[in-house]
Image (cartoon, rainbow, N blue to C red):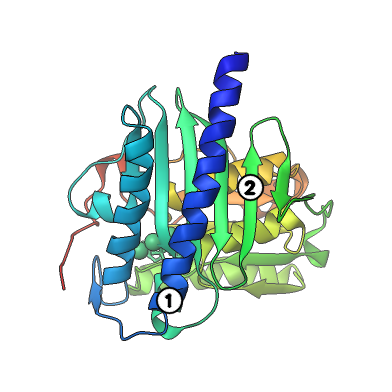
Amino acid sequence: SAENNRHWEECMEFAVQTARRAGQVIREAVKLDKCVTTKSSAVDLVTETDQQVEELIISTLRDRYPSHRFIGEESSAAGERCFLTDSPTWIIDPIDGTCNFVHSFPMVAVSIGFAVKKELEFGVIYHCFEETLYTARKGHGAFCNGLRLQVSKEKDVSKALILTEIGAKRDPETLKIFLGNMEKLLKAHAHGIRVIGSATLALCQVATGAADAYYQFGLHCWDIAAAAVIIREAGGVVMDTSGGPLDLMSRRVIAAGTPEMADYIVQQLHSISYERDDHDTDCISTSC
Ligand code: 2AM
Ligand code: CA
Ligand code: CA
Ligand code: CA
């Protein structure tokens, strides 16, 4: 309805303000000593700032929208299960690119997605160090700092720049599949493969057309929610790595500028299996 439409628009404006405030906290914190602990494995890092920023974002949003639900990476780590209901639900990654943050590698984002009746309504991603803001609302286009975004029209993998991420699982079987997937795309003469350490910013590169595709196994709903709206509103496709419809809780995603590019990559990929987000066991909280 028109009323809901106005309401979600107002929510998105508030999400933008909140993401900018969170980004400022992250910019300040990156200069300080960091207390780093680990979650599911020795390379799955978390800092006090991840937790502080998530608290800041959720408490700010909850004050204004007390009836809404919240899914956040660090709250889920504390044992809150992630699942979508019909209620308006905020899906939050306070720091996407924690490993980058720890190393002061400047690819770190705040990601805030919003779903109603299990459908994504808008997404806001803020690149903290570049101070670039990516936004999209369903049916209203995708923007970067106010400029309209358009995905790449490339269909041919031999002309593609492809992005992916290395997950926290580093057992021999997982690494073999990860490298095998890359090898297939390289043998198909992809122009290049990049790993930038922030799933949300990588997905934003697909939205801008700077990358032709992105795929990843092991992601969580908060890595995908906001970016999925931004890519779709920029004209791209976001789906399951099996080629089926996107399932936010399935821990896997492929995004591309064209369905042809996505389909080609889907045919090449071997899956790495992860426990679903809605039965998650690999989020174990540790405190500083
Ligand atoms: P994070 O920084 O919020 O944890 C790096 O591999 C990228 O993938 C980051 O965007 C990271 O998000 C994300 N990611 C999501 N789940 C991951 C996992 N299980 N292991 C490693 N990276 C993960
Ligand atoms: Ca994390
Ligand atoms: Ca993340
Ligand atoms: Ca995170």
Quarter holding residue 43: bottom left
Q: Is residue 87 at least partly visible in the picture?
A: yes
Where ligand 1 lies, by quadrant?
bottom left
Badge 1: residue crowd in 10 Å (few <14, some 14–19, many ≥20): few
Q: Is residue 249 at least partly visible in the picture?
A: no
Q: Residue at x 56, y 48 (%)?
A: 124
Residue 264, x across and y down, in percent: 71, 51
Front one among 152 and 10: 10
Ligand 3 has an atom within 8 Å of the beta carbon of the residue at disc 2: no
Residue 147, x across and y down, in percent: 78, 52
Q: Is residue 229 above or below residue 166?
A: above
Q: Is residue 56 above or below residue 59?
A: below
Q: Amino acid at mark 1?
A: Glu
Residue 27, x across and y down, in percent: 47, 74
Q: Quadrant of the C terminus?
A: bottom left
Verify CB contact (< 8 Å) between mark 2 and mark 1. no
Circle 2: element type = strand
* Number of numbered callouts drawn: 2
Q: Which residue is mark 1?
A: 28
Looking at this rendering, what residue extends furthest in the top direction?
Answer: 1
Q: Which residue is mark 2?
A: 135
